Structures are given as structure tokens and as C-alpha cells.
Image (spheres, grey):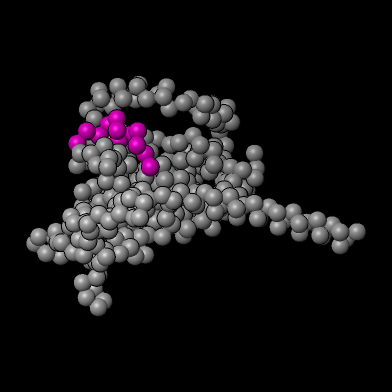
Amino acid sequence: MVRQKRSVRTTKSVMSHGTLATLSVIFMVPFAWLVVTSLKSESHMSSFPPEWMPRGEYVQLGPDRWAEVVRNEIVEYAPIEYDPEGKAKPRVALKSKVDLVDAWGTPLDREPTRIVESDKVVTRVRPTLRHYVKGAGAFGFKVFLQNTLFIAFVAVLGTVLSCSWVAFGFSILQWPGRDKLFYLMLSTLMLPGQVTMIPLFLIFKSLGWINTYLPLLVPAFLGNAFFIFLLRQFFLTIPRDLIDAARVDGCSSLRIYWQIVMPLSIPALATVALFTFLNSWNDFMGPLIYVVDEAKYTLSLGLAMFKGRFANRYGEMMAVSVLMTIPIIVLFFFTQKTFIQGIKTSGMKG
């Protein structure tokens, strides 16, 4: 009986982990295709059937020197030949007009266009970084990245401080009407953002904050209902005896908050910080409404502008999208242990 139960548990574990692994691979396919496409040349982006290897057309200029073909036009064909039945055979290209650049997109000569034999233009499995160089240059990636990081870090700081302080008052401090006010705050989660969008815009416009970062930063210092709830549930897991001992030793509420509660709540605080950073990094609607000057655009708004101006430059669009996605993946990779711990241990007490 014990062996049978153990076998059933093992089977369930294998099936659940296998399902999760399969779903993970499926969800990774779009990002993998995004990366692969950003490393292809234009001639192989729309090939059918799709190619998973980053291929491109190249011309060999020396023993170990290859040049990438940007544009390939046939300029000369072999004479038309006919088979015994009188049908024309496929014409063979003899020469091509090509534009040659290096891997970074720099023309090899002042006049990059050359006439070469068509059989010298070969397809190779070789990634190109040209789209990243051209995309980052035309996209203004450095300026938009600085703007986005500034907004994200200030928003993280404001959200962590304000939400943790309010959650401390709802969990550690004792005062009349605490729970009723907490439930009233939770009810604001049912308000969709579309309801408050116009009133907030009118308020910020009357304050003269349009085309500034203040509408994106100031609300972070006023708390967030979901994060307050998350931190309150975590603070309730802190032993009450520890708080009472600190009060007996003469600690004030501010000192208990800063020296006891905050250090013990690093997993939950990291979770709030990560969620806030992701929201600020991916925020499109906020900058779209309040920011007018192009020099103040964030990455998400700049990507939309880039897409509108260069709709047919798929390589650059793919490269810029990868540059926007990689920092989030790296951040989550290094914080996943703390993030999961913060989610798992929040809400153990009600």
C-alpha cells in the first residue's frame, strides 16, 4: 500500500512538472522567434517555411573575410535555353548588384554597391548585429532608457516607502476603526483605471503638471491598495512578541517600523519593488497621456513612435523589442527566489 501511494505521488509529480515544462517551452517560443528574427538579414525574415537559424546572404572577400549583403539585385542572366520540347529552361543568374556591409552595418567602401558573380552570394548561418546598431541609433534608445529608469526607480522608492508605512499602520499599530478603514481601502481595487483617468488628468492639468514626470511619480508616494494589502498580510506574520519586546525596551513606532519590521520584510518589499518596476517599465498609457515632449518619452512610448515611423523595418523593430525585454528577464532571473518567497509567505494570516 505504501509503495502504491508513493508510485501515485511520483506519477503525479512527473506529470505536473512535465506539464509545466511543456507550457514554459510554448510560452518561450514567441520570445525565441523575436531574438532569432532580430539576428537575420532582411532577405530571410519572411522566408517560408520559417527558418529558426539566423541566416543571411554573404559574399566572401578573402580567406576568412565575409561581407553581409544588404541588397541583392540580379543584373545579368544567362541566355535563355530550351529543352527538347521547346519549353524555356530556368534562367541562371550570372551577376548580381549587391550592397556590402560589415556585421555592424558599416559600408565596406564609400560606394557599397558592387557587381559580383551570383554564385558568390551564398546563404550562411551567421547572425548579424546590424539591426541592433541601426535600431538603437534611430530609436534613441539611450535617452528613452534614461527616462524610463529614472521614472521606474523613483516610483519604486515612493511605492515601497508609502505602502510599507500604511501597511504598518494597518497591521502593527492598534487604533479605532482600523479594520473598517482597511476594508474601505480594499474596495478601491474594484475601481477600474478608466473611471479615474479623466478626473486625474483634469487635476494634474490644473496643477500645471502636463508634460512633466510629476503625474507619473507623485501617485507612487500616495500608496497602492494592492501593495498595501500584500505588505499588511506579510507584516501580520511577524511575531507579536517581538514587537511587544521592542516597545518594552522603549522603541518608538517609527523605530519599530524602520529597524524591525522593514529588515524582516525584505522578501515582501522586493516583491512590491519588482511589481512596481515592471509596471513603470511597461507603462504606455501614463506617458502617452501626460508626456508631450519627445525628449521625455519612455521606452514603451518610444517603441510605439518607432513602429509608426519605421513600420517596414522589421529587423530594427525586433532588435529594439529584444533590448526592451532582456532587462526584465535578467531582473526577474536574479530576484526570482526573493520574489517567490515574498508571494508565498504573504497572506498566511488574515
For this orientation, the residue located farthest to the left is 110
Residue 120, quarter of picture: bottom left
- Quarter of the picture containing the N terminus is bottom right
Q: Is residue 344 visible?
A: yes
Considering depth in this image, is 214 or 314 the residue closer to the camera?
314
For this orientation, the residue located farthest to the right is 1
Q: Residue at x 25, y 23 (%)?
A: 206
Q: Residue at x 59, y 31 (%)?
A: 179
Q: Which residues are magenta?
A: 282-293
Q: Is residue 44 left or right of residue 115?
A: right
Q: Is residue 15 magenta?
A: no
Q: Is residue 284 left or right of residue 295?
A: right
Is residue 289 placed above or below 71 in the rendered structure?
A: above
Q: Is residue 284 magenta?
A: yes
Is residue 259 placed above or below 208 in the rendered structure?
A: below
Considering depth in this image, is 207 or 313 the residue closer to the camera?
313
Q: Residue 184: horizontal and vertical position, in percent?
A: 54, 26
Q: Is residue 161 visible?
A: no
Q: Is residue 291 left or right of residue 278?
A: left
Q: Residue at x 37, y 65 (%)?
A: 125
